Amino acid sequence: MVLQAVSSKKILFSGLALLVVALLYLYKTYNPLEVSFFPKCPFHALTGLLCPGCGSQRALHHVLNGSLSAAFRENALLLIAIPYMGFGMYLDYRKPLPQKLARHRKTFFGLTAIKIILAIVISFWIIRNLI
């Protein structure tokens, strides 16, 4: 029997995958409003204002339990960002990247896109505290 060396990259990926699955299980099973072991927002605790991420834990709980409308009420930005981030991760791990997808990557994740996303996040931050 020949033992093959397992690369540290595979071990790291496996560990991260296990951590993600465990966190998703926790967020699906426990509502962050009802249990105290989930982290609280330090910005909200200090200022009383909502940051762009406030409500993300509750929104993730609702998404994992199939309630998209409740997730949208908790944090609309997160609900919109999930497919965007998923597409970005797909592009990062797809090797080799076809030319068409490379163009999409530049369009959706290039410098201009980053500036637009930053403007959206700042606008969301301001508007949610005015409403």
Image (spheres, rainbow, N blue to C red):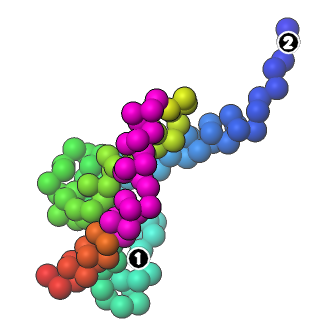
Q: Main secondary structure of the magenta part?
A: helix
* Real-space Cα separation, disc 1 to disc 2, in angstroms: 50 Å
| Residue 31, picture quadrant | bottom left
The answer to whether 38 is drawn above or below residue 127 in the figure is: above
| Residue 30, picture quadrant | bottom left
Q: Residues within 10 Å of mark 1 (few under 14, many from 20)?
A: some
The answer to whether 53 is drawn above or below residue 92 in the figure is: below
Q: Give the residue type at disc 1.
A: Cys
Residue furthest to the right: 2
Say if residue 34 shows up in the picture. no
Q: Name the residue at 33% across, 66% down.
A: 116
Q: Give the residue type at disc 2.
A: Val
Residue tagged 2: 2
Residue 104 is a magenta residue? yes
Numbered disc 1: secondary structure: loop
Residue 112 is a magenta residue? yes
**86 or 11, which is in the foreground?**
86
Q: Name the residue at 18% across, 49% down.
A: 67
The answer to whether 32 is drawn above or below residue 13 in the figure is: below
**45 or 103, which is in the foreground?**
103
In percent of width and height, residue 64 lies at 30, 46
State left or right for residue 36 relative to residue 74: right
Residue tagged 1: 41
In percent of width and height, residue 3 lies at 84, 18
In percent of width and height, residue 114 lies at 40, 63
